[in-house]
Amino acid sequence: MALPLEELIRPSNWPELDDPKAIWNTYQAELEGRGYHLMGSEAYRTLGKDDGLPPPAAVDPFHPKDGENFIHHWRLNPGNLHSRRIVSAWQPNVIVCFAIDRYQRQVVFKAVPSDDSDIELKVLRLLSSDPLRADERNRAIPVLEFVETRHDFFLHENRIAHGDIHYWNILINHADHRDLGAPKENDFRLGFNVEYAYIDFESSHILEPGTSCGHPISHPPEGAASPEQEAALDDENATIDVFAADIYNLGKTLEGELREAFRVYGGNHMPDPLEYNKILSDMTSQKPSERPSAVEVVGFLRNLSGCILG
């Protein structure tokens, strides 16, 4: 029996969801960093409500400029926000989701596999290439952007909590990097393809979908361990949110890296040290429930372009 399309393209690590739209929330922070606000978000419901008319229709709908819309709003009350945020009878689901972009145009996201097996992705990339898009005979729907979701939060996305994140359990692929005191202009990170890798998974947890609690097997060294990790080790029946503990451990590790970066370089290498300190403060909150998720941390750091972590 043939499977429904959404089952065929659903990645194996996506949980079974009562609400299939909920999977899009996983990527909300990343997409907001690119200027998109997903249907259901506060910005989607309210952004533009005081602006009156929607973005104007493009003179050339197959080559819309920034701020121009492919869609012409013909309704009697085009200034009504509700009327221009629902453009069809399509129902958002695990494959399709509505959003608005930075110009308040309604856009549609469609999830497709990113490998070479997907013919739709191949065709759209070809039709959206500069030579074919420039051809006036091309009547394919304009694609504003191909968004490839990255897996910087790969462990948590796959229900794995590391359990022991600290300075010595994150390896950098550059010899003797920890002992380099070079001036900023000679910093290896500015001229080298730097990669960070987690090591030592003896304290890790593999969790079932919908759960985040486990008993810590050990915890990082003093200074990097979260308060709940230290307390739980003295109580064999205690469980903690191990994902939130990972966030705390990583935050403390990055705090140490930041102190070293300021010691060697001062603050000029960072675009916005106050904003960076804010996310580190949130990550190391004493209350696990107040810490951001891995997705939120990744979304923030992507926006803080140019940041060099010591």
Image (cartoon, helix red, strand yellow):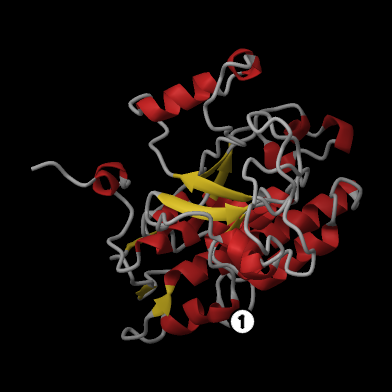
- Looking at the image, is 224 positioned above or below residue 150? below
**Residue 299 picture location, percent across and down:** 63, 55
Residue at the extreme front = 76
Which residue is rendered at x = 86% and y = 53% of the image?
Answer: 263
Question: Which quarter of the image is occupied by the N terminus?
Answer: top left
Q: Quadrant of residue 129?
A: top right
Which residue is rendered at x = 77% and y = 47% of the image?
Answer: 307
Q: Is residue 151 left or right of residue 182?
A: left
**Residue 66 picture location, percent across and down:** 76, 39
Towards the viewer: 213 or 224 = 213
**Residue 15 picture location, percent across and down:** 31, 59
Q: Amino acid at mark 1?
A: Gln
- Looking at the image, is 291 positioned above or below residue 231? above
For residue 224, say whether it is visible: no
Towards the viewer: 49 or 159 = 49
**Which residue is the site of mark 1?**
286
Judging from the image, what secondary structure is the residue with disc 1 in?
loop
Which residue is rendered at x = 63% and y = 29% of the image?
Answer: 62
Q: Is residue 275 left or right of residue 134?
A: right
